[in-house]
C-alpha cells in the first residue's frame, strides 16, 4: 500500500502578504488574504457595472448626507488578525474619520457588498459575510447577477431579495433604497 502525501497550501502571514503586494508584478492584481491563503478576485464586465451602479448610488446617498465613506476594492483588516486582509467589492464606513492613504483600513466596514462572479461560490461568499459580521460589520449584501437576486444579511437576520424588490439600508443606512431591477438592468439591451 502506498502512503500518499497530500501537500497543504502554505499559509501566508499578513506581513508576508503585504510584502507581496508591494512587488511591481502584483500591482494590477486584486488579491485577498483569507485565513492565510492568497485568493485572487477575477471580476467580469457585468460585475464591474453592478459594482459601479451600487457603489455610485451608495456614494451619492452617503456624501450628500455626510454620513461616512464609500469605496470599492478597499482592503480591510482587523488589528491583531495576522491571517486576513479582505477586499470587499464595495464598503461603507460610517462617521467622520481620517481617510486611510496607505495600507489597509484597520477595521471592517459597517456595510460590505460582495458581487458574485462566475468563479465565486455562494458558500464562499457566505463565509466572507460571516467573517465580516463576526468582526463588526453590521450588514452584508451578497449580489448574484446570474440568479438576479441579492441576500441581505445582518447578524440577526437574512433576507433573500428578488429582482422586483430593493436593497435597503436598514439601520446601517436608514432611508437608502435601490431597486434590484436597476442593479441588474442592461442599459444597452432592447
Image (tube, rainbow, N blue to C red):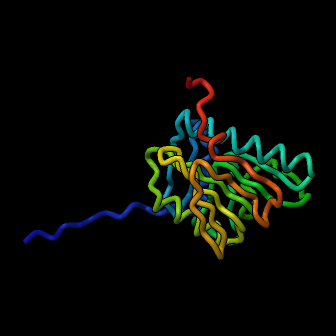
Q: Where is residue 25 in the image (x, y as percent from the top left)?
A: 56, 36
Quarter of the picture containing the C terminus is top right
**How many marks on residues?**
0
Q: Can residue 16 be seen in this view?
A: no
- Residue located 57% across and 66% down the image: 83
- Asked if one can make out residue 165 in the rendered structure from this viewpoint, the answer is yes
Residue 160 in percent (x, y) is at 57, 61
Which one is in front, 160 or 71? 160
Q: Is residue 145 above or below residue 9?
A: above
Q: Where residue 90 sits: x, y (%)? A: 68, 49
Residue at x 77%, y 48% (from the top left corner): 58
Question: Along the line of sight, which residue is nearer the eye, 174 or 10?
Answer: 174
Q: Nearer the viewer, residue 141 or 18?
A: 141
The residue shown at (71%, 71%) is 136
Query: From the image, which quarter does the N terminus lie in?
Result: bottom left
Residue at the outermost left position? 1
Q: Residue furthest front?
A: 164
Residue 71: x %, y % from top left: 75, 47
- State the residue at coordinates (53%, 47%): 148
Q: Is residue 47 above or below residue 108?
A: above
Q: Nearer the viewer, residue 179 or 87?
A: 179
Amino acid at each position: 500500500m502506498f502512503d500518499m502525501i497530500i501537500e497543504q497550501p502554505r499559509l501566508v502571514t499578513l506581513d508576508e502578504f503585504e510584502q507581496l503586494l508591494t512587488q511591481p508584478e502584483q500591482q494590477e492584481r486584486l488579491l485577498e488574504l483569507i485565513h492565510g491563503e492568497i485568493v485572487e478576485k477575477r471580476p467580469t464586465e457585468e460585475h464591474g457595472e453592478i459594482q459601479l451602479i451600487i457603489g455610485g448610488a451608495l456614494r451619492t446617498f452617503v456624501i450628500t448626507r455626510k454620513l461616512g465613506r464609500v469605496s470599492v476594492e478597499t482592503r480591510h483588516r482587523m488589528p491583531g488578525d495576522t491571517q486576513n486582509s479582505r477586499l470587499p467589492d464595495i464598503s461603507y464606513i460610517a462617521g467622520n474619520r481620517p481617510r486611510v492613504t496607505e495600507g489597509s483600513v484597520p477595521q471592517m466596514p459597517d456595510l460590505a457588498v460582495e458581487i458574485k462572479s462566475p468563479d465565486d461560490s455562494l458558500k464562499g461568499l457566505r463565509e466572507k459575510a460571516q467573517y465580516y459580521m463576526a468582526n463588526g460589520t453590521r450588514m452584508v449584501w451578497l449580489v448574484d447577477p446570474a440568479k438576479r437576486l441579492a441576500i441581505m444579511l445582518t447578524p440577526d437576520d437574512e433576507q433573500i431579495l428578488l429582482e422586483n424588490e430593493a436593497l435597503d439600508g436598514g439601520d446601517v443606512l436608514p432611508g437608502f433604497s435601490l431597486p434590484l431591477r436597476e442593479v441588474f438592468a442592461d442599459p444597452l439591451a432592447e
